[in-house]
Structures are given as C-alpha cells and as structure tokens.
Image (tube, rainbow, N blue to C red):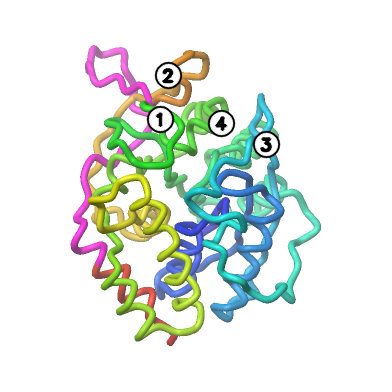
Amino acid sequence: MILDVDTGIDDAMAILYAVNRPGITLEALTTTYGNIDVASATRNSLQILEAAGHSCVPVAAGASRALTRPFTKAGSRIHGPNGIGNVDLPIPKASARDIWAPDFIIELVRANPGELTLVPVGPMTNVAHALMKAPDIAQKLAGIVLMGGTIWHPGVPGIPSPVADANFFNDPEAARIVLKSGAKVTMVGMDVTMKTKLTAPMMDDIAARGGPAARIVMEAARFYLAAYQAQYTDITYCALHDPLAVAVAEDPSIVSLESMQIDVECVGELTRGQVIPDRRRTGTTVPNAEVAIAVEAEKFEALFVETMVMGA
C-alpha cells in the first residue's frame, strides 16, 4: 500500500491503522496539502511513524497546492494549527526522501506492477500529477481506494461546500483526472465515512490499552471531537474518515459497493467539487468507479479499536 496523506488528525489515525494491521504492508507515505500545508503534513507523518516504531517507512513530500489554484489553509479549526490537535511531539529523527511524491509513486508502481494499492486520503493532487506524467501506472496499480467525494452530503462540520467534501473541493480537477484515468477506483465518500463513530469512551479505551502512538493519536482525536462539538453541540462523536478508506483497501466487504459512472464538477459557482453520478443505465454509461454506499459501522468501529491497540 501507498498511503497519500495530508496529516491531519484522521490521517494520523489512518497511518497508525495501516502500520498496525497484519494484513497491510505500508510501502510508503506520500504527503500533500489539505488539512495543513505540505511541510507540516510531512513533519506530522514522520512524527506519527516514529512514535509507532515505523520510521523505516519512506516518506516523500508532494504537492503544495491544487492543480489550478493556490492553497488556502483552512483546516486549523478542525485539526489545530499544527494539524494534529496541538499535540507537541519531538522533531522527527528521520527525514523525507529527496524525491517528489508523484515521482516516488511512479517509481514504486512501475517497480511493483499489479501489487500496490494507492490510498489517497487528502486532495488527489499527487495522484493526478503522477497519472499525468505516467499514464501507464493506471493499469499497473492493483487499485486506487480514495477517501473523497460524496453522493449525498451529510452536513459534516468544517466543510466549505454544501455539496462537496473537502478533498474533492480542494482540487476537483485532480479528482477528475483520477476518475478518468482508467485505474480501478473505489470511492469511499464522506456520506459513508460520516456513519462511522469515534466516541470519547472509545478514545479512553484505546488510550488505556494502546501504546505511545495510540495515546498520541487519541490525544489529537479529543481536539477533533471538541472541534465537531463546537459547531454541533449535540454530536457525541467524530468520524473515522481516512481510517475507513484504509480498511476498505484491505477488506472491501466492510462496505457495500455500487458500480457507477461518476464525474466531478470543476466549474460551478456553487457546485465546485460535487460528485455527479450517472445511474441511468442507458446503455451508454460505463462505470468508472466502485462507490461505497453503506458501511458496517459497528463492525468497523470494533476493528478500529482493536487495531489501534495492537503493538502496545
């Protein structure tokens, strides 16, 4: 697996989930802007890997902005000024590789044809750059399992659009390139990830039974939950957006999937980043993605807790 992150609190959860799962081999982390700027996302990723005892996983920094517009930092209200809930961690001993993330993706995929699943959980910019530079990798990937998009908007706090999730909103042009690449794409959208719950008692359980990395990530998760509750006072949980995409990459049966032809609105004044599904089955529609439409939430939540405490 290659995990493309904008670390980010739920990205930190996804990183720990990936390194703890016995069935996942994390070959690399690539970083991008999104929840935080790319330099901070890279630092945070190195710190989480170090805390988890997996500094050997290579990290490569990538895109600092979308394909067509500059990055405007907007995630601090949800993720904190440092991206991981203001948790103070030591300067990482390891450094990012001296290679641009899209080039690293190309290198790894070409060296391991048919073996790697790419899991982007931030804006799709790194993946789009890689696909534009090396279109052949679309057929050399085992698949792309992305966290992004939404078919039905769930009204999640902190999202700047009433019709799009943050990842597709930040770079819809990149998302469109990914969807039209010919790669085997699975979309795990915000409408499904919002059905998963991380509650305060679950955080307490993980922190009590888990190792140092689990305690760090749960400390950050408390900031995440407080950010949700600052906007929706009746909410008692935060969602497991990015970890669910990693889980689906390992075991797709945890969600229900529907084959769809989907596109992304790139121009609309009100609809930038919106996923447009064509479900008419007219004979001319050709599905280009497997789209998650439901999740076994309780099963995944139990799996998430047990995975977080592995390696304690």
Residue picked out by circle 4: 171
- Going by the numbered disc 1, the residue's amino acid type is Ala
> Could you tell me how far apart the alpha carbons at marks 4 and 2 are, in whole angstroms?
13 Å
Whether tag 1 and tag 2 are in contact, CB under 8 A, the answer is yes
Residue 307 drawn above or below residue 210: above
Q: Earlier in the sequence, mark 2 or mark 3?
A: 3
Residue 295 colored magenta? yes
Q: Which residues are magenta?
A: 275-301
Mark 1 secondary-structure assignment: loop
Residue 137 colored magenta? no
- Going by the numbered disc 2, the residue's amino acid type is Thr
Mark 4 secondary-structure assignment: loop
Mark 4, other Cα within 10 Å: few <14 / some 14–19 / many ≥20: many
Residue picked out by circle 1: 164
Residue picked out by circle 3: 65
- Going by the numbered disc 3, the residue's amino acid type is Arg
Residue 234, how many percent across, how many down? 23, 51
Q: Write the residue at 61% across / 63% down.
A: 45
Nearer the camera: disc 4 or disc 2: 2
Q: Write the residue at 61% across / 37% down.
A: 125
